[in-house]
């Protein structure tokens, strides 16, 4: 993994290489830190102080992310690592690094304050978009302005992670709403490729009134059902472009657009860069 170190012990790590078989187990020391890891493709199993963690896209075929806090010096044991390619983006900061805007909402707040306290989450379009910007900008040779821009991209990635982590733990969702949330998530995941999937069909399939569905999605996902469906389709299109398993036209179809031009406009508005930039940044398997 290529790691860039910036003031405040802020680190950005990017790995995007073929790892066809699991590497031999390895061990190294970790200092106290707050860390966010996004695995875009591959499989990784590791232990931190004898607590085992697994990040893998092999079964679900979609990115997975993890937020973790280390309050003391720890030992990392890497047990398994493979991927074609193995694609991962990670950022870490010192555990007392000030993030005033996020205080009370993420790491550094009471939500994750103990050693090895962690949370798995499903990355949203902001997290995926920020990660793609870091992958696209990776280069061993950058001038001063390029380094500042790259550090800014890393901070945006971490901010997006904090936001996603906060929404994933929103206390406003009452426990009696969990079954309904599960139905919404599962139905969207299963029917994302169905052009007939929309807010109305989702409310009918989940036996919820449109108003209840709107309130539920707004409280838990931070957006209405139509925007939630659109963002999940955009994330799917982004993954297809990164894997080079789809052209821009095919990605437009995945995202539910009949016009590649309209898709490109919406994609750039969502992620801040064009679909073709994603393809150009991945000359081989990305």
Image (cartoon, grey):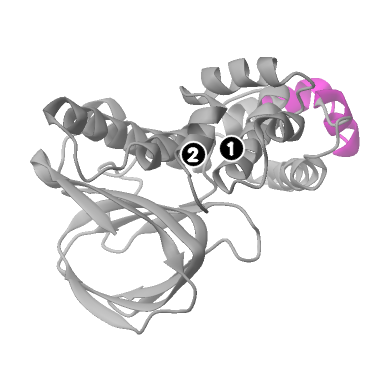
Q: Of tags 1 and 2, which is closer to the observer?
A: 1
Q: Residues within 10 Å of mark 2 (few under 14, many from 20)?
A: many
Q: Is residue 166 visible?
A: no
Compare marks 1 and 2 and give the one earlier in the sequence. Answer: 2
229 left or right of 266 in image? right
State whether the magenta stretch is mostly helix, strand or loop.
Answer: helix
Pick the residue in front: 213 or 82: 82
Asked which secondary structure carries label 2, the reply is helix
Circles 1 and 2, Cβ within 8 Å, touching? The answer is yes
* Residue at the (90%, 32%) spot, across then down: 204
Compared across the picture, whether 188 is left or right of 73 comes to right
Name the residue: 39% across, 38% down: 136
Cα–Cα gap, marks 1 and 2: 8 Å
Residue 63 placement (x, y as % from top left): 54, 51
The tag on residue 238 is 1
Residue 29 sits in quarter: bottom left
**Bounds of the magenta segment:** 199-216
Q: Residue at x 74, y 46 (%)?
A: 189
Residue 112 appears in view: yes
Name the residue carrying label 2: 128
For mark 1, give the secondary structure. Answer: helix
Quadrant of the frame with the N terminus: bottom left
Identify the mark at residue 133; answer none if there is no mark: none
Answer above or below: position of 218 versus 238: above
Residue closest to the eye, 188 or 277: 277
Direction bottom: furthest residue = 24
**What residue is at 77 percent from the left and 28 percent from the top?**
256
Residue sticking out furthest to the front: 283
């Amino acid at each position: 993994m290529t790691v860039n170190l910036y003031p405040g012990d802020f680190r950005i790590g990017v790995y995007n290489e073929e790892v066809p078989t699991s590497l031999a187990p390895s061990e190294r020391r970790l200092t106290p830190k707050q860390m966010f890891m996004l695995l875009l493709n591959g499989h990784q199993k590791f232990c931190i102080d004898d607590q085992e963690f697994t990040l893998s896209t092999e079964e679900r075929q979609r990115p997975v992310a993890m937020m973790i806090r280390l309050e003391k010096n720890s030992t990392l044991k890497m047990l398994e690592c493979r991927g074609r390619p193995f694609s991962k983006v990670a950022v870490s900061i010192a555990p007392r690094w000030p993030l005033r805007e996020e205080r009370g909402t993420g790491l550094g707040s009471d939500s994750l304050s103990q050693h090895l306290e962690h949370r798995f989450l499903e990355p949203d379009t902001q997290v995926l978009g920020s990660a793609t910007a870091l992958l696209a900008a990776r280069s061993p040779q950058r001038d001063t302005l390029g380094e500042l821009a790259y550090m800014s991209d890393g901070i945006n990635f971490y901010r997006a992670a904090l936001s996603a982590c906060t929404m994933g733990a929103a206390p406003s969702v009452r426990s009696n709403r969990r079954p309904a949330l599960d139905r919404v998530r599962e139905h969207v995941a299963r029917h994302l490729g169905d052009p007939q999937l929309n807010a109305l069909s989702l409310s009918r399939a989940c036996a919820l009134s449109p108003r209840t569905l709107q309130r539920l999605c707004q409280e838990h996902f931070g957006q209405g059902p139509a925007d939630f469906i659109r963002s999940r389709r955009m994330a799917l299109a982004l993954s297809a472009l990164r894997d080079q398993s789809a052209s821009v036209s095919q990605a437009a179809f995945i995202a539910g657009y009949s016009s590649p031009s309209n898709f490109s406009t919406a994609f750039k508005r969502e992620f801040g860069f064009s679909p073709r930039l994603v393809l150009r940044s991945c000359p081989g398997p990305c």
